Amino acid sequence: MDPLVITAHTLTSAAGTGIAANAEALRNGVSGLRPCDLESVSLDTHIGRVPGVEAITLKGELAPFQCRNNQLAELGLRQDGFADAVAAAVARYGADRVAVLLGTSTSGIAATEAAYHRRDPQTRALPPDYDYQHTQNMFSLADFVATRFGLSGPALVVSTACSSSAKVFADARRYMAAGLCDAAVVGGVDSLCGMTLYGFNALQLVAAQPCTPLDRDRAGISIGEAAGFFLLERPSPDTTGPRLTGHGESSDAHHMSAPHPEGLGAATALQQALERGGRRGDEIDYVLMHATATPANDGAEARALVRSLGPRPRAVGTKGLTGHTLGAAGAVGVAQALASLDGGFVPPTAGLKMLDPQLDLEARGEAEPRLVQRVLVNAFGFGGNNCSLLLEAAP
Amino acid sequence: MKAIGLHAVGLLGPGLDDFDSARPVLAGETPLASREVHVPPPGLLPANERRRTTATIRLALKVAEEATEGADRSRLRSVFASSSGDMDIIDRICDALTQPEPVVSPVQFHNSVHNAPAGNWSIATRNPAPATALSGYNASLAAGLLEAATLQLDEGGDVLLACYDVPSMDSFIHVRPIHHPFAVALRLGPVDGAPWQLQLDLGGPAAADPCHSDDLEALRGSNPAARALPLLERLVRGTPGNVTLEAPLGRSLNIRVGP
């Protein structure tokens, strides 16, 4: 496929605010997880909470968008000169030629949860200041980002659970191929809320201790929040940066909340990403796995890796740093892959003590300094929704 | 964008039981007889899965089944577009979260994801092809059409678009006044052999076209998925022409409909 150039990006997660802090935490395996201290939640678990989200106040025409998800988006958009890069893209192409394609799983539902706590005791009516359209509605995130930057290109929010912010990269490639836009702001934001914490807890998928992907004793997920944004453009003499060279998408067609045990859908997504990129499995430096740290998920994904790349592929799980950021997981994975391409290291699998021998993977608890040129990033979601992305260093 | 083929349509709304039986209403020959919408259980799902479906899943799958009648359901890619997703579940979970010791149903939680209809569709049809779920608020139909068209143009083959929204629950009805379910599905594919051709053009700010019939016009604004009605009217009238829909971020989607 025709590659896309990532000309700017930014990441904010529990592991750090901005790409430099996240890259440092990634290289050193420093976890941002902490015991759950979310006001409305009393569960025995660890969370990846981003400091400073509550202090963000959205003003002027952005004021109606005020909710944790858009506050986190705003905190992210203030980092790494991303806003300047978008402004330059607007100047170059026009505001109507810059697409806004973002992923989230729960959007601003924390605002709805809070509004339910403030319902009228007699009529059960929601409080008059509650603004559904600009907070909880799925499209709120794209609307917020477009309003903030004055963008009017094609826009949507993809919400396919934990693959959401990976799939938007594939969308951007197709929208550009169809001539709908010349640049795209892609990525995703998901933020901590009662619904996901209590929901995953009800499914008995939440670990009490910080999650340990790929570990023999892994016991479930830690939930986190993150905002990751990327500016994608076509290759040209003026655009430099790492590239999206392949993507693959598939459905398990198996179960709503459990992966296909053999990872068949995941393997299809990986193979498609390789095919689109014109690469063989042995040309990939490592796979940045979805690796949520539930026993079933990591097992199924490991089988998919072996199926598509051969025995004992080099693999990394990073959710011990950030927690599972759900709809933002794809964006977090891509930003981490870019950090390793740029910094010349294969990241450690943070929290790994004893690699599960049944996974048949090669994974380490420490960073491995070496040239990295090609990384596959996985993001898989409920509904058996799979996406793999192939990222390559600037040529 | 290049033209794509429209091969079949699915429809469900007040007084509109399916696309074929709704043709006289859409053609303006018969008045709309408003009656409560009955959403049948999805025939393609096994019984144990069927019991666990929600109104949103049943609504989306009903029109998806209709638009793919006779087609190979095990291969087509799918796009599920909805402004709000499963508002019933969101209501129940948010209500549960106000309790001192919240208990969230695991089945409700996994059905709460915006792509629950997409996941159920892929399971029901044993279809490993990519499926997506998206929102463009009131312009979810236009966003879904662009998404489906880019998928079709990229790789050819058939693409299913289902667009649907369930009514708001009581506590939400003033916040988001959607009073009845509405759903439409389009099976898009190659131009060859298609009864209609659609040429999409994402335009600047422009008013969306109203419906020809006053009955249908009253429906159009009442549910984001009902924004499809002017397009459906154009399809059954059989004459080439343009339909303008509301697109996200104040844009418009112009659809040139040809035979």
Image (tube, rainbow, N blue to C red):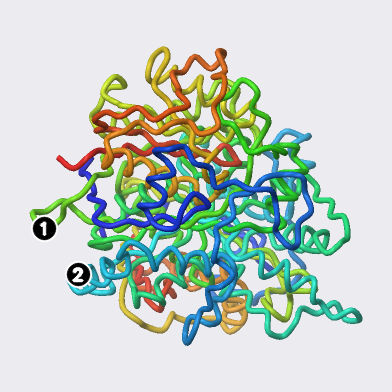
Q: Nearer the viewer, mark 1 or mark 2?
A: 1
Front-most of residues B182 and A99: A99
Position of A169 with respect to A320 (left or right) is left
Residue at the image point whose x is 89% and y is 79% from the top: A121
User: Does label 2 lie on the same chain as label 1?
Assistant: yes
- Left or right? Give the position of A167 relative to B90: left
Local crowd size for mark 2, using a 10 Å CA cut-off: few (<14), some (14–19), many (≥20) = few
Judged from the image, the secondary structure of the residue bearing numbered disc 1 is loop
For the N terminus of chain B, the quadrant is bottom left
A337 or B12, which is in the foreground? A337
Label 1, on which residue?
Answer: A238
Q: Residue lying furthest right in this view?
A: A122
**Closer-to-camera residue (A327/B142):** A327
| A263, above or below B79, in the image | above
Q: Nearer the viewer, residue B52 or A183?
A: A183
Q: Chain of mark 1?
A: A
Tag 2 subunit: A
Write down the quadrant of residue B174 in the picture.
bottom right
Residue with the mark numbered 2: A93
Kindly report the distance in space between the C-alpha atoms of the residues bearing marks 1 and 2: 13 Å
Q: Is residue B25 visible?
A: no
- The type of residue carrying mark 2 is Tyr
Position of B186 relative to A309 (above/below): below
